[in-house]
Image: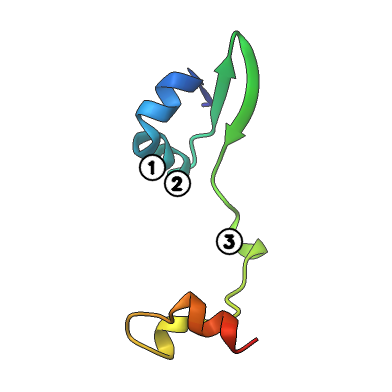
């Protein structure tokens, strides 16, 4: 079932609604009684891993080092 909440409520409790979306509960965010966006679970089949920088270096890669090599 879809949840409908106000924008202020969404901002104040972002983590709560992110967890709900991960569980498959879509959230519609309203402003002045009009829907402005929907938060929902991402379908995993649309994403692929291109590169995992933690495999190069345990803490990841510094963005400035990466950009300087491009």
Distance (Cα) linking label 1 and label 3: 16 Å
Which of 51 and 63 lies nearest the eye of the viewer?
A: 63
Q: Are marks 2 and 1 in contact (CB under 8 Å)?
A: yes
Residue 19: assigned label: 1
State the residue position of label 3: 44
Residue 28, image x, y percentages: 57, 25
First of labels 1, 3 by sequence position:
1
Res. 52 visible in picture: no
- Residue 70 in the image: state x and y as whole percent: 65, 86
Q: Which residue is under mark 2?
A: 22
Quarter occupied by residue 55: bottom left
Q: Residue furthest top?
A: 33
Residue located at (63% from left, 29% from top): 37
Q: Is residue 7 above or below residue 16?
A: above
Residue occupying image coordinates x 44% and y 27%: 10
Q: Nearer the viewer, residue 39 or 68?
A: 68
Query: Is 12 rendered above or below residue 18?
Result: above
Residue 8 falls left or right of residue 37: left
SS for callout 1: helix
Q: Quadrant of residue 36?
A: top right
Inter-mark Cα distance, 3 to 2: 11 Å
- Res 59 visible: yes
Q: Secondary structure at mark 3?
A: helix
Q: Residues within 10 Å of mark 1 (few under 14, many from 20)?
A: few
């Amino acid at each position: 079932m879809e949840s409908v909440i106000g924008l202020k409520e969404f901002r104040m409790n972002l983590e709560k609604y992110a967890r709900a979306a991960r569980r498959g509960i879509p959230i519609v965010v309203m402003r002045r009684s009009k829907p402005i966006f929907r938060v929902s679970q991402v379908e995993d089949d649309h994403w692929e891993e291109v590169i995992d920088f933690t495999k190069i270096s345990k803490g990841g890669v510094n963005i400035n080092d990466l950009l300087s090599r491009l």
